[in-house]
Amino acid sequence: MPERGPDKIDASAAKARPHHVQDVSRAVLRSEQAKRWTKRYRTEVAASSSSLLSTFVAYPLDSVKTRLQAYQFKSFTDCVLHTYKTEGLHGFYRGVWSPLASITLVRTVSFSIYQRSKYAIDDWMFRTTGGSPLVIANTKGALPTLSTVACFGLSGATAGAAITAIACPFELTKLSAQISVLMADRKDGCGTNDAVRKSYQNLGTFRTAQNLIKHRGWMGLYSGFHLHLLRDTIGTGIYFVTYESVKQILANARGTSPTSPLAVVVAGGMCGLVSWACIFPIDTAKSIYQRNCLVGGRGKAERPRIHFFNARMYRGLGVSMSRSCVVNAIFFTAFEFTKKRINRMTFDEELLREHGA
């Protein structure tokens, strides 16, 4: 049997090894790049994944809330039974895909803008007054101050105003999907055009948007924008002030980390309750106005006035607050947990530098 020469051995080894080694190197490099990217965008990653979970769990309550705002029902139970009787279980999840996409996008962008605004405002306040609101908020034993409330409130309001341009069309199509059956069956709310009212029934998100453009033009996608902007600017500011302040108070009272599980769950639930209690009449006016735009065709929609402390404007508040409490408790728990896990991740910076990645 002839001996294999060195050249033949090297050639066979070259065939056996380099491809495998190269594959492993690429896999390792991709893994390290993914870890670095995840750490860099940990806020966005945590917000998007947590939003998907919390939105899906609490969507049926949001659907009932919208129906109660836009139409007359005897009670929460009456609305639930009517929805189940006429539309089945699917009725509670009608239009869920639009908010799953939109709320995830909106929350991700919102938290990203909030984080950047928070640090920018903190830096400006430190240079102006010599005190840092974020340092105060993370100081053991310190309570919320005017500067921390201003910092969190302005940052939240900035985020809320910025995301309205993205959120308004999605929320309008979601509302249409949730009440499309009611619009077809009922004639209340200034809608007299039967063909227009019934044309929205059982449409998906994209076809609803097409139908809206057909009846009201491209700007129809932004019907109710002024009310949406007002609601989200005020509501998001209150939302973040409540979350950060309650979390700070609870953490200091127990001598624990501001991101301890109990502080996060309670603060998450409270921020939803407080913000909705403050802005609910604005949200109701928005829902009624958007419904009027949908059923009114190209005609000018009636603009409802915002009446605080009027029982009509608070219909569905209990459902909305319950839903918001559940959503935000789940969201912030998942958000803080995910961020902690990402923060503990490590990656090989030297390896990435060597490969120019």
Image (spheres, rainbow, N blue to C red):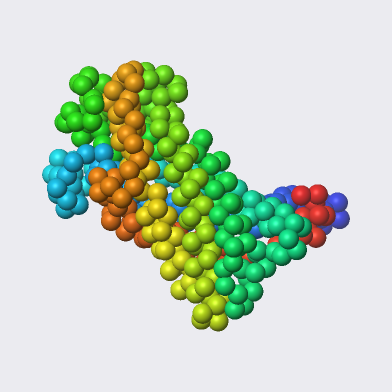
72 left or right of 111 in image: left
Quarter assignment of residue 300: top left
354 left or right of 117 in image: right
Rendered view: 87 above or below 138:
above
In the rendered view of the protein, which quadrant contains the N terminus?
Answer: bottom right
Task: Report if residue 194 is visible in the image.
Answer: yes
> In front: 74, or 194?
74
> In front: 279, or 119?
279
Percent position of residue 341, x then y? 57, 66
Quarter assignment of residue 344: bottom right
19 left or right of 292 in image: right
> In front: 174, or 15?
174
Identify the residue at image location x=46%, y=50%.
Answer: 235
Quarter assignment of residue 149: bottom right
Percent position of residue 93, x then y? 29, 45
Identify the residue at image location x=51%, y=69%.
Answer: 247
Identify the residue at image location x=53%, y=66%.
Answer: 245
Identify the residue at image location x=39%, y=27%.
Answer: 209
Task: Report if residue 13 is visible in the image.
Answer: no
Q: Residue furthest right?
A: 6
320 left or right of 227 in image: left
Q: How many marks?
A: 0
Percent position of residue 198, x then y? 22, 25
Percent position of residue 150, x then y? 59, 57
Rendered view: 132 above or below 226:
below
